[in-house]
């Protein structure tokens, strides 16, 4: 029943402390709670969600968590209820020892905003510890002549509780000579002292047995007992006396091990063995006994371990001086440890992803970190800095926290990873510093379009290329990364000769390789303009264009075509006329040919492959002019056959041939007289047909000759009026006046005009072609040749 009432009482106290802590935190802008120690795990501390102005589900969504340094986590967050609860049983004595007010401080971090809220929880003491004597039994030796009111220090009593739950008093068992009194310092331990109330008489009672009870002020009261044996000694008049009741000294924490700190000194007015004094520590904790040592004979105190201001900045030692008979006195030694700047600052990165998109604006928070220095004063005052050349800066937050933020826009293509050195420096003399590396990765944003290496490409492809062959490749580079840098290629829509460009060429969207979809023909088209687009895979995608000019290179795939003389389609043979009076170099006719290729593939040369009478005619290498090579003789045959070849300069060269028939005669009648020699008679009608032709040609030639004579007479009358012929006479020396022979309306041009007589030997008709004037320096086109309409004489 008592246990139940006690638990209810504790619960009421817990609620009261929590309420007071919440109200206090709201007033001071700091969240404060109070709880009793030794609560079960998961016990309610405070409604942290309400104090942060959040709903319980928001704790997980906003990444609310506890941030603390240097100790085991004592509390946790119940994300479902929004409460701050204990993470386990909390022992106030273990946590704060003898500190009257036990405060646990930590921070609550709201991750999404990187905001910190300081929280302070006071651990309230309960009476869970019984006062304990350092020794259960103690012997005290007192001289029999000790004066009443003399005091004798007893063993130390330790109660780790605080306040009313700590040690409150002592009770001594009933006796006639002694009482107990308490000596203590502010917030220090309490020492019981045995007070002599009445004079002793060793002979009457040499030993006194006492029981000392130590009690705390808790509810219920806890107590412990110790037995004290008082031995009455024979008289030793003088006890050792220290030169000072309190010794004070200050030493730096970097004092070497074995260095003397100070010396205590006590003297005894007695003589002999009664004046021999030895020194010892009185009831010091084991930890302190490992740090300081005392020379029992000299009283010199020296260090036996390294001092550390951060562990303890002050030591209080009790030193006892005792003579041989056992009389003693005590003095205090107060040692203050001076802080030395022997701890470098520490940097602890608390939060942040350390990855930032390059599109984020200046002022974006990247990470949060804390700096601290275990030293004190200026030695523990720390400042942080980063290189000024970086696009970042530090912003001071609460409780030695710093934010790392951007101060300008970032460009991943320039720097994709920053290794930021944070230098933390204290203000000690000399100052100490530490460097911490924080890596910040810049995430890519699609802010760069693909770029071609050239703004214009020229591609040369020989014609007759294989269908489907690769002809060229383009490459665009995108300085972005991953999908933003993955480039695809395409061709802009266009047409060529009424067909889409995509029917001529295609492009591999991944590699940028161009393929010919058909075999190109230089004679059909010679160039192709393409617009190539490179697009990345970003969102939204970016693109750029480049122009590509595709030129088709000519191949020697066309043989020369002979335009004149026109190749017969019905088996007839053309006849050219060369008068027997012609001088060497006389222009008989001209072979005219063209080549559909270009360049050297279209450069033509002419040569005489075969002649019925070698050496009689020559062919101009580049002009194709057929001229007499020597004077014609009577013995030369009337019919001369010439095989002329026309060849281009391609690789390999292509050629064409034509056979020319040249009639050697001074007049057309002479030619006609021997026409029978040009063809064998194949039918009884051939002789009649030839006679008709001769009569017709003779008639036409006579009429035409008369017309020319009349025309020349009229021109000679105006000779004196014109000097034009005189000026150009030299130029026309090679072109004498035409001699005309009329043959029934048929025109024949001698010397300056070429003739072509086409006689059909195996058909019922013959052709006489009236050609155009033949100029040595002019090529006769195929069109002009086609205008020479023949006179058809149809045999009945």
Image: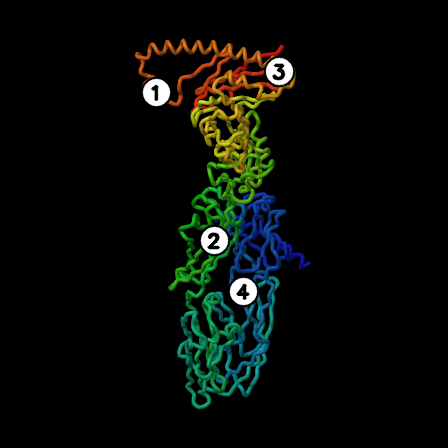
Asked if labels 2 and 3 touch by Cβ distance under 8 angstroms, the answer is: no
Q: Is label 3 or label 2 in front? A: 3
Secondary structure category for the residue under label 3? helix
Q: Which mark is residue 419?
A: 2
Q: Is label 2 or label 4 in front? A: 2
Indicate the position of residue 726 as horizontal and vertical percent values: 32, 18
* Front residue of 710 and 161: 710
Indicate the position of residue 105 as horizontal and vertical percent values: 52, 56
Indicate the position of residue 340 as horizontal and vertical percent values: 41, 66
Indicate the position of residue 429 as horizontal and vertical percent values: 38, 64
Secondary structure category for the residue under label 4? loop
Instruction: Give the mark nearest the N terminus, 1 or 4.
Output: 4
Disc 1 and disc 2: Cα gap in Å? 97 Å
Q: Which mark is residue 686?
A: 3
Disc 3 and disc 1: Cα gap in Å? 46 Å
Left or right, residue 395 beside residue 505: left
* Front residue of 70 and 665: 665
Disc 4 and disc 3: Cα gap in Å? 150 Å
Instruction: Give the mark nearest the N terminus, 1 or 2.
Output: 2
Q: Is label 1 or label 4 in front? A: 1
Does 21 sit above or below residue 226? above
Disc 2 and disc 4: Cα gap in Å? 44 Å
Secondary structure category for the residue under label 1? loop
* Front residue of 62 and 600: 600
Pointer 1: what residue? 729
């Amino acid at each position: 029943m008592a246990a139940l009432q006690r638990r209810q009482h504790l619960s009421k106290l817990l609620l009261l402390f929590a309420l007071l802590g919440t109200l206090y935190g709201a007033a001071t802008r700091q969240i404060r709670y109070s709880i009793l120690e030794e609560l079960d795990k998961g016990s309610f501390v405070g409604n942290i969600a309400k104090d942060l102005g959040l709903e319980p589900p928001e704790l997980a969504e906003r990444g609310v968590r506890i941030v603390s340094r240097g100790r085991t986590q004592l509390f946790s967050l119940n994300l479902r209820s929004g409460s701050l609860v204990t993470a386990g049983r909390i022992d106030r004595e273990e946590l704060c020892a003898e500190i009257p007010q036990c405060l646990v401080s930590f921070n609550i971090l709201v991750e999404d905003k990187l905001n910190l809220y300081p929280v302070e929880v006071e651990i309230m003491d309960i009476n869970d510890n019984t006062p304990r004597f350092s020794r259960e039994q103690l012997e005290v030796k007192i001289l029999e002549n000790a004066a009443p009111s003399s005091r004798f220090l007893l063993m130390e009593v330790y109660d780790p509780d605080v306040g009313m739950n700590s040690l409150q008093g002592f009770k001594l068992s009933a006796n006639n000579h002694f009482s107990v009194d308490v000596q203590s310092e502010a917030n220090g331990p309490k020492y019981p002292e045995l007070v002599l109330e009445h004079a002793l008489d060793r002979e009457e009672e040499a030993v006194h047995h006492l029981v000392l009870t130590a009690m705390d002020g808790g509810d219920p009261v806890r107590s412990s007992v110790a037995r004290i044996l008082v031995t009455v000694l024979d008289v030793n008049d003088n006890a050792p006396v220290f030169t000072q009741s309190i010794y004070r000294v200050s030493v730096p924490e970097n004092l070497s091990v074995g260095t003397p700190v100070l010396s205590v000194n006590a003297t005894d007015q007695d003589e002999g063995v009664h004046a021999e004094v030895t020194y010892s520590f009185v009831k010091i904790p084991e930890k302190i006994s490992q740090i300081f040592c005392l020379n029992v004979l000299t009283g010199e105190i020296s260090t036996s371990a390294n001092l550390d201001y951060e562990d303890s900045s002050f030591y209080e030692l009790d030193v006892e001086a005792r003579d041989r008979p056992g009389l003693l006195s005590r003095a205090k030694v107060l040692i203050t440890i001076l802080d030395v700047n022997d701890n470098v600052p520490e940097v602890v990165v608390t939060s942040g992803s350390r990855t930032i998109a390059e599109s984020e604006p200046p002022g974006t928070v990247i990470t949060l970190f804390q700096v601290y220095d275990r030293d004190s004063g200026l030695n523990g005052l720390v400042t942080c800095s980063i290189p000024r050349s970086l696009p970042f800066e530090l912003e001071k937050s609460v409780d030695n926290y710093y934010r790392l933020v951007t101060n300008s826009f970032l460009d991943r293509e320039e720097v994709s990873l920053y290794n930021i050195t944070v230098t933390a420096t204290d203000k000690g003399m000399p100052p100490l510093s530490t460097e911490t590396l924080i890596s910040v990765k810049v995430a890519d944003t699609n802010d760069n379009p693909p770029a071609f290496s050239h703004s214009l490409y020229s591609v040369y492809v020989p014609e007759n290329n294989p269908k489907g062959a690769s002809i060229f490749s383009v490459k665009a580079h995108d300085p972005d990364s991953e999908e933003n840098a993955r480039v695809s290629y395409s061709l802009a829509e266009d047409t060529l000769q009424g067909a889409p460009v995509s029917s001529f060429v295609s492009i591999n969207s991944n590699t940028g390789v161009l393929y010919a979809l058909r075999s190109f023909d230089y004679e059909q088209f010679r160039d192709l303009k393409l617009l190539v687009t490179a697009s990345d895979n970003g969102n939204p995608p970016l693109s750029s264009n480049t122009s590509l000019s595709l030129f088709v290179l000519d191949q020697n795939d066309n043989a020369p075509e002979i335009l004149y003389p026109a190749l017969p389609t019905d088996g007839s043979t053309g006849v050219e006329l060369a008068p027997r009076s012609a001088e060497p170099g006389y222009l008989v006719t001209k072979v005219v040919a063209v080549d559909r290729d270009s360049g050297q593939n279209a450069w033509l040369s002419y040569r005489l492959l075969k002649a019925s009478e070698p050496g009689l005619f020559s062919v101009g290498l580049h002009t194709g002019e057929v001229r007499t090579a020597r004077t014609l003789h009577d013995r030369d045959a009337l019919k001369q056959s010439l095989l002329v070849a026309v060849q281009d300069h391609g690789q390999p060269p292509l050629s064409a041939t034509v056979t020319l028939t040249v009639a050697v005669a001074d007049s057309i009648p002479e030619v006609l007289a021997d026409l029978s020699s040009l063809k064998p008679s194949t039918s009884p009608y051939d002789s009649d047909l030839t006679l008709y032709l001769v009569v017709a040609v003779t008639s036409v030639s006579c009429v035409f000759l008369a017309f020319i004579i009349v025309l020349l007479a009229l021109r000679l009358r105006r000779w004196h009026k014109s000097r034009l012929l005189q000026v150009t006479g030299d130029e026309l020396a090679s072109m004498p006046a035409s001699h005309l022979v009329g043959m029934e309306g048929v025109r024949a041009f001698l010397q300056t005009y070429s003739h072509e007589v086409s006689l059909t030997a195996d058909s019922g008709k013959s052709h006489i072609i009236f050609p155009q004037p033949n100029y040595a320096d002019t090529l006769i086109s195929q069109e002009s040749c086609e205008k020479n309409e023949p006179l058809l004489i149809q045999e009945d």
